[in-house]
Image (cartoon, grey):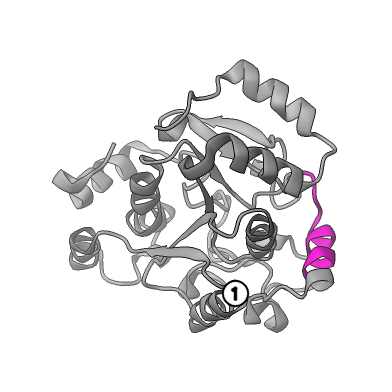
Amino acid sequence: MSVDLIDELEAGELSVEFEGQEPWEVLEWAIERFGGGLALSTAFQEGDVALIDMAYRIDPAVRVFSIDTGRLPQETHDLVEQLRDRYEGLRLELLSPDAAQVQRLVDRHGPNLFYRSVEHRLLCCNVRKVQPLTRVLAGLDAWVTGLRRDQWASRSDIRKVEIDHDHGAIVKLNPLAEWSEEDVWDYLRRYDVPTHALYAQGYTSIGCLPCTRPVAAGEPVRAGRWWWETGAPKECGMHCAIETGGFEHELHAIVGEDRHE
């Protein structure tokens, strides 16, 4: 780690200070405070690409990473190429899950295990998303996300500056927390930022291809994620810990000696 980590008291004070300020002001502070110990996480949602644009304007050398689960739609990879073309020299890293872990997962449960139960879906998310995220965050002081309070009930109380106790008590920054979906799209239109092609087909939240569908008018933003589940959290475990006894036991069997704490 390159800097002294922020504690809960300072994080709370900073969250109060940044409330009402624009996302790029949070990013300016974070880039100055953490330097090379900071990275922006992206899944190429609308808020994510807005943050890439903001951060690149502040520091073209800012580090950006994404988890390529192996099940992403082609349109996501197309957007990656658009962003590389638009932002010359952008440090955009695509990180893959551990191949041996994925192989064990598929050998035990097949490629589409997520349709069978919530626990199977969480298992797939953990191997393909959470484990790679844990590895990259282990080398950081702070990370930036595109989370907003209006996205889902589980995100309604997020702060702009948090301590991420699930990942070594590093700092987690949510500069868009106060913004609405319309605020984000206003920014994207104003600066002509490349966006995901699936938005034009009725998608409002885009993840892996088998686990995402378009939403109907009036449905919540994340209604198209894991739509076949009933009463389950619309989360994959990247932004909040989701654990059950059976899930944890099975995860240990899949990850085995490759597991990173």
Q: Is residue 241 left or right of residue 148?
A: left
Taking the spot 65% from the left edge, 49% from the top edge, the residue there is 147
Task: Name above or below for residue 222 compared with residue 203.
Answer: above
- Is 187 a magenta residue? yes
Residue for badge 1? 213
Instruction: Assign the magenta stretch its main secondary structure.
Output: helix
Coordinates of residue 240 in the picture (x, y in percent): 51, 40
Q: Which residues are magenta?
A: 178-188
Q: Amino acid at mark 1?
A: Arg
Location of the N terminus (image quadrant):
top left
The one of 32 and 239 positioned closer to us in this rendering? 32
Establish if 3 lies above or below 233: above
Residue 116 figure quarter: bottom left
Q: Nearer the viewer, residue 111 or 42?
A: 42
Residue at image x 60%, y 31%?
162
Q: Residue furthest top?
A: 9
Question: Horizontal and vertical percent for residue 84?
Answer: 53, 75
- Counting from the top left corner in percent of width and height, residue 83 is at 58, 74
